[in-house]
């Protein structure tokens, strides 16, 4: 990325559900905000929401971390009670996802902020509606993608599949992060960063240690931890220059 071009945002996807991408996305938003960056956040689709009149847990954490004043319908436009893929949940609840409107909302949000973080649902192949996948949303919004994987056994397979799919679909990937590295890792977890780096052409941007506490406490911890990581200069290249 040329030094003269200021990045506009990142689309954060995971290698699957439950890899910690919400905590990481919110931590990035919090760090950017504390650096004086006008940061926008968005959780386009969230399922398993107990009260769909409010933000789901993921969307609420993003809104809290960024201290956003953007309307709920902009930051969390589709909220479903059914804990399933968005396409399945929307069909069961008879609340169809208007894909074109969703893409336009995301693009407009990106234009309104200095930097925008958009968190996907699950992984790249998760269906949204009408044959559209999360990967289509990434491409149509037009932001580069950051992949979040966990450090547990199986991450090499999941990570390679995600990165190869992104390459096949011609999505721009800035790199990937290994999340939740235990304080005392197993042999597989300890070897994962090196093994993945030797098998991918995409860049390993960070290894985030496992943290404990409530979701908000974890977000605060990771936000403070990010700039102390040895690989922070690698990740900073894709963030605003003021960071």
Image (spheres, helix red, strand yellow):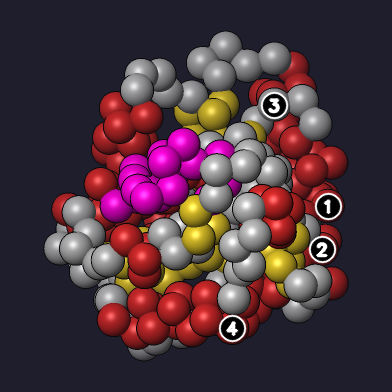
Q: Nearer the viewer, mark 3 or mark 4?
A: 4
Q: Is residue 221 left or right of residue 35?
A: right
Q: Residue furthest bottom?
A: 4
Which residue is disc 1 drawn over? 161
Q: Are marks 3 and 1 in contact (CB under 8 Å)?
A: no
Q: Is residue 183 visible?
A: yes
Q: Residue visible at 69% across and 63% down?
A: 128
Q: Which residue is mark 2?
A: 165
| N-terminal label among 3 and 1 | 3
Give the residue drawn at x 70%, y 74%. 136
Check disc 4 and report the residue beneath it: 100
Say which label, 4 or 2, has the lower sequence index: 4
Q: Are marks 4 and 2 in contact (CB under 8 Å)?
A: no
Q: Residues within 10 Å of mark 2 (few under 14, many from 20)?
A: some
Find the distance from the CA under tag 4 to the CA under tag 2.
Answer: 23 Å
Magenta part of the protein: which range? 46-63
């Amino acid at each position: 990325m040329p030094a003269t071009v200021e990045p506009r945002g990142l689309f954060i996807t995971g290698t699957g559900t439950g890899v910690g991408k919400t905590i990481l996305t919110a931590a990035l938003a919090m760090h950017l905000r504390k650096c004086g960056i006008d940061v926008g956040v968005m959780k386009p689709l969230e399922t398993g929401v107990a009260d769909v009149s409010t933000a789901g847990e993921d969307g609420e954490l993003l809104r809290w971390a960024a201290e956003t004043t953007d309307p709920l319908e902009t930051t969390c436009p589709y909220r479903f009670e059914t804990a399933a893929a968005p396409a399945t949940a929307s069909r069961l609840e008879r609340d169809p996802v208007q894909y074109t409107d969703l893409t336009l909302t995301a693009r407009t949000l990106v234009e309104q902020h200095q930097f925008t973080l958009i968190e996907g649902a699950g992984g790249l192949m998760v269906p949204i509606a009408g044959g559209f996948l999360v990967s289509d949303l990434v491409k149509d919004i037009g932001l580069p993608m950051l992949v979040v994987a966990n450090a547990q056994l199986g991450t090499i397979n999941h990570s390679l599949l995600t990165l190869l799919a992104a390459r096949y679909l011609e999505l721009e990937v800035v790199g990937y992060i290994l999340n939740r590295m235990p304080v005392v890792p197993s042999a597989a977890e300890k070897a994962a960063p090196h093994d993945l780096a030797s098998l991918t052409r995409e860049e390993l941007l960070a290894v985030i240690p496992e943290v404990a506490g409530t979701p908000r406490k974890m977000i605060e911890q990771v936000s403070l931890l990010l700039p102390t990581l040895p690989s922070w200069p690698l990740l900073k290249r894709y963030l605003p220059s003021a960071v």
